Amino acid sequence: MSTSPELLASPAASETPVARPGKWKESLPGLARHGFLIVFTGLTLWPVMWVLKMAFEPGQDFAFSISPIPSTISFENFARLIGKTDNAGNWVFARQALNSFVIALSSSLLGILFAATAAYAFSRFKFPGRRAGLLAFLATQMFPGTMMMIPLYLLLNYLGLLDTRLGLVLVYSTTSVPFSVWMLKGYFDTIPKELEEAALIDGASQTRIFWQIVLPLSAPAIAVTFLFSFMSAWNEYILAAKFMDSELHYTLPVVVNSAIDAKSVRWGDFAAGAVFVSAPIVALFLALQRYIVGGLTAGGVKG
Amino acid sequence: MAQVVLDKLVKRYGDAPPTVKEVSLTVNDGEFLVLVGPSGCGKSTTLRMIAGLEEITAGELRIGERRVNEVHPKDRDIAMVFQSYALYPHMTVRENMAFGLKMRGMPKSEIDVRVDEAAKMLDLEHLLDRKPKAMSGGQRQRVAMGRAIVRRAPVFLFDEPLSNLDAKLRVQMRAEIARLHQKLKMTVVYVTHDQTEAMTLADRIAVMHAGILQQLATPLELYEKPANRFVAGFIGSPSMNFCEAAAGKDGVLAFGVRLPLPERLGSFSGSCVAGVRPEHFVEEPAEGRVAVPVVVELVEPLGSETYLTCTCTDEKATRIIARVGPRCPVKDGDKFTLYVDPKRLYLFAPGDNGPAL
């Protein structure tokens, strides 16, 4: 076997990355992959940046250039959005933002409470209708939410809860239950049964086991489920627009959409509203990021 | 303290054949009883029925003088150590150990005294503020035992507590469990599939197979007088050598030789299964020992002893394992003669689990 001159070269020389022939060839698929990802990231971010541009550029200035970078920064749109008054001249924005917050928070908390208890029962107990119940929950997720609009409207009307926060809280919390049950049940299934058996022998009741052993161990799944519930309630527009009549009871998505009326479209106000509505969700996502990764992958690997 | 009585306990899941079939035994007050058997023999199910974690299909379970079939686990006066330790991951060692006492409404000052005492006993004092994930397997196992100890329950149940530990740690923890039992004198029901654990720890051993209690006896009794072929094969390592045999007036034809029939069998004749433990095939001849010619297939030196896998000269070329001295001068393929004392011969009725004759 002959020894090629390259093999006789000093190890230091062979370790220099640029000196290795074929390096470019090897990294070509990598480069292509990165190029593809960069282009797609750009395409994804472009509309988001445009919304930011529309929100921060005064008036209709944004329409003059295709660039997503705003030429001037102004908070005029935000000021107009926040300073909005109703027909009687009362400042209503704070109340509307509070509506959104209270409704999203209460419906998520209430939804999680219902879902966690139901999911625990589905995960741990054997009872008639267990499988049918789970499948029924799954089936509800196959239909668009708007399909339920008319029955929900009639129900709320019957209960006298139209145009109330409580009505919307009940609607959002119950509609979030099926998804949350499946999410939480999947996680509860991964918690070893021995822990509960040990607690049972230690003298804990089933309720105490649920609150003191199972729930604390399910923090990641609870956090993710809470985030999804909060997000869907916070962003929901159609039901809120139909069920809330008075401007004082509007939630933020309805407020944002009011920038578009029959006569004109105030894109600046619309974009500022969109940014304003998205900000808390982004913050929540960042705060719960650690749990989201843990929660979404939970169940794949035990431990 | 309390005795535990299992009276014809049955466990059946749905329409399937019972997992535990009419197991009856009494664990005396302060006794260390080991339930041993291969996987799926029903030993863990039996333990879980005692703990109250499985419903009892039929039969009666008494702890002390009380029938506890329908009693909630927490009211059965038992403490349990699980194979997976089952420590609460979100609680510190102290909280883990205190949980059971807290649930029983004990005052905090007394809880602290008990936890500190148990921690001292198990050398866990420096770990009390740690969470389970920051501890080694052995430490976790000690916490699991500590959790049981603080309860001062009269009956302790152990479900394969050492299975998750490495060999060295297992030996250490085994000694620790034995020491604890000597000190606390509690009644123990201990489940394991490891016969070394069973033999070293138990006052008495209950051997289970296919949901049936095969034999309940002291370790030595099990070794010397196995009730059937299963127990004979299960107890002892390497396990007993078996050979289909024929007994007649002139002895038993087994392992390619004719061995005198043990006196207790009188004039038994017919087909049977002969059994000789590996340690009873020896390399030195002596008076009364019968020569068994074999061909050595494999020599496994272990330092203190050597295992020889050999084939006998009978028609079926029965394969046997002999446990001989460390310096036995043989190598693979050698023709060799082993010697067996006919008193060490066991005979069983034909079949996979024939009773001892």
Image (cartoon, rainbow, N blue to C red):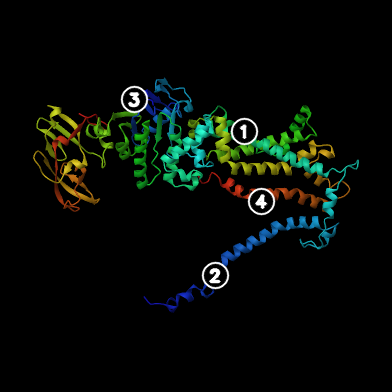
Q: How far apart are marks 3 and 1 (CA)?
A: 50 Å
- For the residues labelled 3 and 4, the Cα–Cα distance comes to 60 Å
Question: Which mark sits nearer the N-terminus, 4 or 2?
Answer: 2
**Residue B52 appears at what percent x and percent y?**
45, 27
Q: Is residue A233 left or right of residue B38?
A: right
Tag nearer the camera, 2 or 3: 3
* Chain under callout 4: A
Residue occupying the point 23% across, 49% down: B304
Q: Residue furthest bottom?
A: A5
Q: Which residue is drawn at 70% across and 44% down?
A: A231
What amino acid is at disc 4? Leu
Badge 1 amino acid: Ala
The kind of residue on which mark 3 rests is Thr
**Distance (Cα) linking label 1 and label 4:** 33 Å
Q: Nearer the viewer, residue A206 or B106?
A: B106
Residue linked to disc 1: A136
User: What residue would you read off at disc 3?
Assistant: B26
In the rendered image, which residue does mark 4 sit on?
A: A286
Tell me whether marks 2 and 3 sit on the same chain: no
